[in-house]
Image: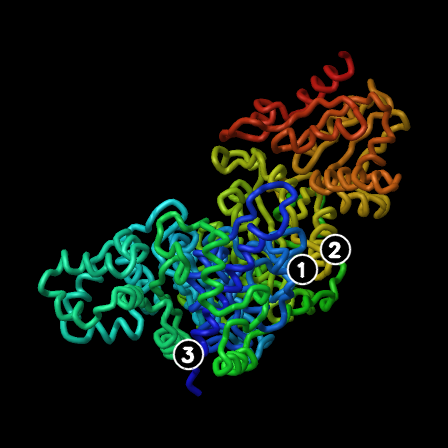
Amino acid sequence: MSIDTAALAALDERLRWLASWTIHHANHIRPKADGVKVGGHQASSASISAIMAALYFDAMDENDRIAVKPHAGPILHAIHYLLGSQSREKLENFRGLGGAQSYPSRTKDVIPVDFSTGSVGLGVAITLFSSLMQDYLVAHGRLAEADKGRFIALIGDAELDEGNIYEAIIEGAKHDVRNLWWIVDYNRQSLDATSADRMFERFDDIFSACGWRTVELRFGKKLTEALGAKGGKAVRDWLEALPNADFAALHYQGGAAWRQRLSDDLGKKATAFLAAHEDDEQLGELMTDLGGHCMETLTHAFAEAKKDDVPTFFIAWTVKGFGLPFAGHKDNHAGLMNPTQIQAWRDDLGIAEGEEWAPLAGLSDNMAPKVEALLEAARIKRDKRPRSFGSVPIPTLPAPEGEEQSTQAAFGRILMDLSKAGGELADRIVTTSPDVTVSTNLGAWVNSRGLFKRREMEDVFAKAKIPSAQKWGATDQGQHIELGIAESNLFLMLAAAGLTGDHWHERLFPIGTLYDPFIARGLDSLNYGCYQDARFLLVATPSGLTLGPEGGAHQSINPPLIAMGQPGLRHYEPAFADELAAMMEHAFRLIDDPDGESTYLRLSTRPVEQVARADDDWKDGALQGAYWLREPADGAEAAIIAMGALMPEALAAHEELSADIPGLGLLAVTSPDLLHRGWTAAQAARWQGSRTPSHIETLLSRLDQRAGLVTLCDAAPASLSWLGGVLGQRVAPLGVERFGQTGNLADLYATYRLDGKAITEAMAEILLT
């Protein structure tokens, strides 16, 4: 059925008004308690309003999911206000506490937001990985073909400077992604300047090389017709060569400036064209009739693209601030209409004073019912999707047997045992890794569960009977998605896989592995996944300078500190295989718990002698962040506090020093992150009348108030040195603050003061001074 484009254009104008009024109200009407500018992006919202109107009220279906560019948040709120799923109260409190968020937020907004945006570029790329996860669910029988949708990203043109977008499309080409629309709001103006012209001449080549179709929506219907009439060819050629900055300036100056410039540049070649458009105001409107604002152009292009599932890159030419007084001005990015300007626009729209929030104010008696019909017929999700948790039983994970094991090797064995045992959890696990699958001990899992590809990929080595430990054939039933080496893609994949429960009510348990030092390389994407509460298990290994001869840039120092500052991500660093098994089991539970979060395991390649356990009393403490591996005497004057792969040094030092320091304790820290969280939470709770001590306070209270603490970790010493502030006890922190080098462990530990001698010296210094 053909869409009423006139009604759609009227709806577009209404969206621009509501978005602009929302921002105006926050900045000029709502009282400011602190005097700080609220801000908002009237110009950026106006440039994309037509595109969003055409999508939401014509092109999109209920199964489609969309990432809205950050600065178009007010348009998104306006859309749902007209649909009845956003309240006036939230709009009036735009950018206030509990109000409509500045940028679309899955967790904080009350309207349906498929992907949080704000960190530019990431909201674009995640749609690619979500499309891949949709194919995964269909292939595994967890989603019907009829329930599939398209993944759409609305892109500010400056976002295309972000490198993660190109890392993503390269990965997408490897996996033959489909059902993707990326739509660029090409208004050619960013925060500081007008966009350079040259790059947009290359996007067709870049995206085509990766299997995309590129559609350029440059001119609207009226301008296209005018350029096809007498004298139009010369004007078209001139327009297509016109620099972006010149176009913006001419738009801001208006029709008379267009006429003068055309006459100056084209002379007699422009005579016929200018004669056909004698009114300056109409000429100005015609010259800025761009494809991104023309409903006929937009609806036709989207309808054509819906005929297949080819990933499509739309370049929609727009004007920043379209329809607003500062349209085209180079400084309009954060510009705000003043009260006089918005009152004049309100009057032009026929909106009575006091009716600014009325959903259909200003529409004629003839147009209002047509717009209402568009609102009623919209096929998008109007209300926020309920989150689905608690649907998958989590079995007990036994620790692998062995007197000496590394946590990295134990991780691979636990996964392999889980695969052999089978069950719903094993079937819902999806693993992924950026070209380090084998070296992070996922090889056995992949051999058992297979690589995932939509189209079968034969294992050429196996067919040729060439011996290999790895089976690299792939089918659509595989459960491992192999990625290229870009860590940003790993975290975006984990985020997409971690949102399947929210997008399709089909919970997956994503596990991603990488080398610990390279968390930092993809940290923005990791933070982005946590920000929207995607659930996954991140396994980083090897860690620290304990990786030994590898050394150098492969050594990690600060990831525990990163984890301590990262909301939504729980950090564990186990020393023993049984600790790891308990933490993996707990991590799976957290993935499927409404109050859960993602988990980061920092593992090691160092084989460690396992400790004998009399019972499971240690387990609860380990999951809270620490437990006494060697109990202290009440009121003991000292304790060793150690974490992870350095536990053998701590145990040996404890045995040696115990003869001279009666009651010496050894505290095994499994999560400085959880200990710190618990400590600060307990402090805050005291102001509400609570007297319950935190876990770390309870543990350290066993010691004398002036006890000495020697902290030991293969990481930045600040990861544990803060423990002295809990009860005011003295601390001698040992850790790594310099870049590492190659060498055997004994030499490295001695060089960086992580060995038994260093522990003894630190203990002597703290007790004798």
Residue 449 appears left or right of 222: right
Indicate the quadrant where residue 675 lies: top right
Q: Which residue is mark 3?
A: 6
Residue lying at 31% horizontally and 71% vertically, measured from the top left: 220
Work out whether residue 274 can be spotted: yes
Tell me the crowding category of disc 1: few under 14, some 14 to 19, or many 20 or more residues within 10 angstroms, Cα based. Answer: some
Q: Residue reaching furthest top?
A: 769
- Helix or strand or loop: what does disc 3 sit on? helix
Q: Which residue is mark 2?
A: 398
Residue 59 appears left or right of 423: left
Residue in front for this viewpoint, 501 or 414: 501
- Helix or strand or loop: what does disc 1 sit on? helix
Q: In x, y percent, where is residue 621?
A: 80, 43
> Disc number at residue 698?
none
Q: In x, y percent, where is residue 472?
A: 47, 63
Q: In the rendered structure, are the residues bearing label 1 and label 2 in contact, judged by CB atoms less than 8 Å apart?
A: yes
Residue lying at 67% horizontally and 20% vertically, measured from the top left: 757
Q: In x, y percent, where is residue 567?
A: 65, 47
Q: CA distance from mark 1 to mark 2?
A: 9 Å
Q: In the rendered structure, are the residues bearing label 3 and label 1 in contact, judged by CB atoms less than 8 Å apart?
A: no
Question: Mark 2: which amino acid?
Answer: Pro
Q: CA distance from mark 3 to mark 1?
A: 62 Å
Question: Mark 3: which amino acid?
Answer: Ala
Indicate the quadrant where residue 9 lies: bottom left
Question: Mark 1: which amino acid?
Answer: Asp
Mark 1 or mark 2, earlier in chain: 2
Mark 3 or mark 2, earlier in chain: 3
Count of numbered circles in the view: 3
Residue in front for this viewpoint, 171 or 676: 676
Q: Which residue is mark 1?
A: 417
Tell me the crowding category of disc 2: few under 14, some 14 to 19, or many 20 or more residues within 10 angstroms, Cα based. Answer: some
Give above or below for 60 relative to 43: below
